[in-house]
Amino acid sequence: MSAGTIDPKLIGSIPLAVLKTTPAGQPPLGIQPNFADPPTRVPVILGVGIAFIVLAVICFSLRIYTKLAIAKNWKWDDLTCSLGFMFSIVYFVAVVRGCINGVAGRHIWDVYLDKTLNNSSLEQGYITTIMVTPALGLIKFSLFIQYYLLFRPLRWVRISVWIGATISAVFYVTVTIVAFVLDSPWPGESLLEDILSWHYLKFAQFSIPTGVIGMLVDWYLLLLPIPAVLTLQISTAKKFGILIIFMTGGLAAIASTVSLYYRVQLQEDFSDPTWNIGYVLLWAQIEMFAGVAASSMPTVNQFFTRQNFPLRSWRSSLKSSLTRLLSSFARVKSLNRNSSFTDWGRSNTHISKDPEGFRMKDLKSNGYEHKAAKAPRMGDSQIHLTEDIPITQEQLNDISFGPVVTGRHR
């Protein structure tokens, strides 16, 4: 008997004591029901789901902090990712409730009807069905916006983003509306009547087509930035590092592919839906949270490299001050050892800054070109200071704020 032929009112008339002792399904030949210690996929579903939501929360928190407190440049991709993450959290809570208090991840012949029909199981079926589409759609749309902002100068990337984002937006908006219309209880229906109704089961038939399109969008998003990164005029090492950041989205693409496999399995074999739905829920969570992490990775990288930290200017200033202080100290020691040149040394030596760091240089005296070192002679009014200021590399390495480039007199 299929779900569409079950009379919800008949089920509602069954006493609770009977529901607690009636198996929810018949086992295959040779299989005995196990109500005491049945096999279950719940530990895997919850363990992996929790691990991925923790990863997503960490990446998303760093993203929000960096965008609001450091960069101060909140953009549309941040908004869409935030909304998608909110839907994903609602989805996750429904999965957890259904796994702990419901029947998801267990064989249908190993559970009683009362647990199959309780609020946790029914709410899990309803909430996950209507939350998955807007969650995935918003997360993927945030990636399209991010690619557009990052690679805007490349015309072919702009066109590719517009095409992919338009198709994705139309698809996910349409499916979301249809899901709310067909899966939500119609006037006068209870949640049990809704889940057993023809309109709820009708939407379930679109599970595989929506999974296929979602998988294609994921792989499109994964491959889109690769040629753009390879055309950048940077070193191969930097290109590889950027690709690593974008390739974190590969996990979402793999998750959508595996999720499609379990959707097909669920559609083809409805004899054990509570067992088969477990991994559909699991891989949908992985796809969502991996998508949030992948969308946040460029900002996470920005956070750890401190590209926009105000602390950087403070570090640069302190490094410059300490370098000048150390250089002055070394200069005084050098000139003290050459007391006959003290007067010239004070006026003819200075610190100049070039793009690579600080260099100690000797100035020519009285406008003459620098030539080979000469010993000073009494009465010679044109004496040139040619001795390099002795600052050793070890002294410079004592400064812990970054490398300082030294150079000799040219």
Image (tube, rainbow, N blue to C red):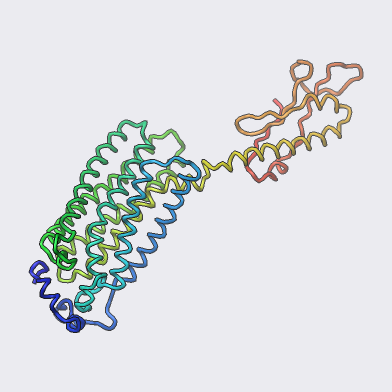
Task: Judge whether 286 appears above or below 232 on screen.
Answer: below
Residue 295 x, y percent position in the rendering: 37, 48
Instruction: Name the quadrant containing residue 113.
Output: bottom left
Toward the front, the furthest residue is 188
Q: Which quarter of the rendered picture does the N terminus lie within?
A: bottom left
Toward the right, the furthest residue is 378
Of residues 172 and 196, the one nearer the viewer is: 196
Residue drawn at point x = 29 percent, y = 81 percent = 37
Residue 120 x, y percent position in the rendering: 26, 70
Q: Which quarter of the rendered picture does the C terminus lie within?
A: top right
Residue drawn at point x = 28 percent, y = 34 percent = 159
Residue 307 x, y percent position in the rendering: 52, 41
Of residues 359 and 316, the one nearer the viewer is: 316
Task: Judge whether 121 appears above or below 65 on screen.
Answer: below
Left or right of residue 240: residue 131: left
Left or right of residue 324: residue 235: left
Residue 401 x, y percent position in the rendering: 64, 44
- Count up the numbered dots: 0
Left or right of residue 73: residue 44: left
Instruction: Name the quadrant containing residue 163.
Output: top left
Instruction: Name the quadrant containing residue 125.
Output: bottom left
Left or right of residue 324: residue 301: left
Residue drawn at point x = 38 percent, y = 38 percent = 229
Residue drawn at point x = 82 percent, y = 34 percent = 332
Of residues 205 and 276, the one nearer the viewer is: 205
